Image (cartoon, grey):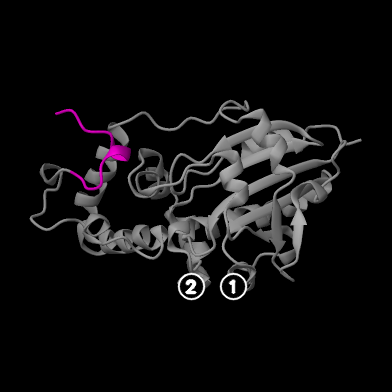
Amino acid sequence: MALAPWNSVLAPPRSLIASPQPLPFFSLSLPVSSSTCFLLAAKRTDVAMGTSFSFIASAFSSSSSSSSSNLSTAGFDETAVDALGNVQVLTSSTGKPAFLKDLWDQKEGIAVVALLRHFGCICCWELASELKELIPRFDAAGVKLIAIGVGSPDNARILAQRLPFPLDYLYADPDRKAYDVLGLYHGLGRTFFNPASTKVFSRFSSIRKAAANYTISATPDDKSSVLQQGGMLVFKGKELLYARKDEGTGDHAPLEEVLNICCKVPVA
């Protein structure tokens, strides 16, 4: 039976669900955080619904080819990338605005700009946790890490304090200006029903680790923010060396790819 594209529907066909009751992933109404939806489904699966949930995960994967990473900058408009430097983000420690172009040397400096999802997303916490582990390698290579999340500086500080994550590397973009300039994906289908999101099912251990001190209170007040997807960029000065859009929730750029680019580029 042919499966409809999951990013084009709002609910799965009932024929795909073996149980007379919908799985918790689909029976929930739109939650405050998309990540909460994933966690509740995973918890329920561990207890009673492992086979049913793995079947749904398989259906997601088979309905579309998985998102592949590519070491190019395809899909990013050059004008938009140039405009990114004039976007202001807020420092998480003080809330003061800062132009992105002022955060690294625009001539020869190497920067990794990681656009997370919103600060209340557990997948955002997972990626932030993995980036934190790489900070010594970034610093040793002379690479500036700039992690940006959707929400207020208060939301950012909640993540920074509880994960924890160093404030000096963390910025807030409450109005999603950087995301809009780059054309990063946003919407219900991308957030909940994109096949690329099934990658989170293979990362339960890292998600559980990141969730140790997790709180949903880091979620932005603007609930449309939970539908925002992230991305990853690597710059040398103003030159874009690598760019990748997250296709769905938890579809992060492979960090080995990022390291292979940013930590092998000669620093002036």
Q: Main secondary structure of the magenta part?
A: loop
Position of residue 64 measured from the top left corner of the image (x, y, whole percent)? 32, 30
Q: Looking at this view, is 103 or 251 the one in front?
A: 103
Closer to the chain start, of discs 1 and 2, is: 1
Residue type at the position of mark 1: Ile
Q: Is residue 264 left or right of residue 245?
A: right
**How far is the residue under mark 1 from the one under mark 2?**
8 Å
Q: Residues within 10 Å of mark 2 (few under 14, many from 20)?
A: some
Q: Looking at this view, is 233 or 183 the one in front?
A: 183
Label 1 secondary element: helix
Label 2 secondary element: loop
Q: Is residue 227 left or right of residue 25?
A: right
Residue type at the position of mark 2: Thr
Q: Looking at this view, is 194 or 60 the one in front?
A: 194
- Quarter of the image with the C terminus is top right
Position of residue 243 measured from the top left corner of the image (x, y, whole percent)? 62, 34
Residue 8 is inside the magenta segment: yes
Q: Residue 215, labelled with which disc?
A: 2
Residue identifier under label 1: 158
The quadrant holding residue 264 is: top right
Q: Residue at x 21, y 57 (%)?
A: 49
Q: Residue at x 69, y 60 (%)?
A: 170
The span picked out in magenta is: 1-12
Q: Is residue 30 left or right of residue 99?
A: left
Residue 255 is inside the magenta segment: no
